[in-house]
Amino acid sequence: MLAVNRMSPWRHRLSGAVLVAVAAILLDPQQARAEPGVPVPPNGLLTDRGRGDVSEADRDFVVKVRLAGLWEIPAGEMAQDKSDDPRIKSIGQDIRDQHVTLDKLTRDAAKKLDIDLPDEPNEDQQKWLSEMRESEGEEFDQVYIDRLRAAHGKIFPAIATIRASTRNDTVRKLAQRANQFVMTHMTLLESSGIVDFRALPTAPPPAAAGAGGSATAARLQPAANSQTPLSVAGTPVLPIVVVALASIALTAFTVRHFMQDPRRRYRRQRSRSYEF
């Protein structure tokens, strides 16, 4: 009895801590869902053997990736000479170096698939390079950032289309790699803090829901902000409660096992005999 009484404060503390944790979960369900790390696409799982039909869209995509490097590499080099901002210089250098790597991947894919590639930028890209050559300092920074950000925004959806639809494994792998480069470049450009987002093209409005089944299904869906008895702020509460109760049960079992272990009681009694 003495051993149990001496352990009771710890039992109360553990139970109290569990109850506090459960209360926090129920009051703020968002905290119960730990956000996992953003995964990196496992490129090594994709084959690159040139197998599968190559569509005209695939060929056009490979050409566009090549064209991107033909003007963004010299643009990044100009950033080193024309910008006075260390951040812009760094962005330009990073994008330039990464496009050198992407260009090699593109040329390798084109060789494997017998796709002819251009050797100079297209007309629009040459105009953008001319704008940069004619500007200096802050003016150059704005032209450089806005032109590259707009260009990446245009090729971004094209990459997604090819990645999702191509039948050729080499094009598929190039699209996945290109997507990683483009996302990185968009983030770098936006980190400059001077992107004019208002000048970017807006997304087309979503198509109206069709009649019949679609409208019926829409009516059956709960409102986004509705709170049912089994949800709080759109988060199901039942799984959270189950996890919380399981945690309480596990804690209670552990404490009970710890108290009932005769060897532990024996050791505690022996230790108390030497307290004097």
Image: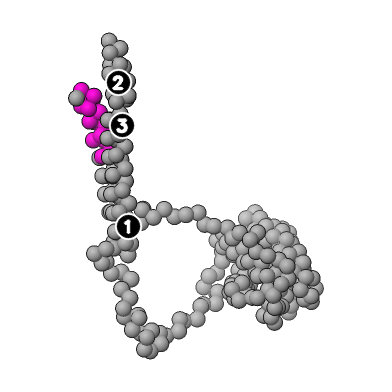
Question: Which image quadrant: the N terminus?
Answer: top left
Relative side of 260 to 92, left or right: left
Residue 258 tag number: 3
Magenta stretch, main secondary structure, is: helix
- The disc labelled 2 sits on which kind of residue? Tyr
Residue 22 magenta:
no
- The disc labelled 3 sits on which kind of residue? Phe
Q: Earlier in the sequence, mark 3 or mark 1?
A: 1
**What residue is pinned by disc 1?**
239
Q: CA distance from mark 1 to mark 2?
A: 41 Å
Q: CA distance from mark 3 to mark 2?
A: 12 Å
Look at 28% across and 37% down and name the residue there: 14
The image quarter in which residue 79 lies: bottom right
For the record, the magenta segment spans 2-15
The image quarter in which residue 170 lies: bottom right
| Badge 3 element | helix
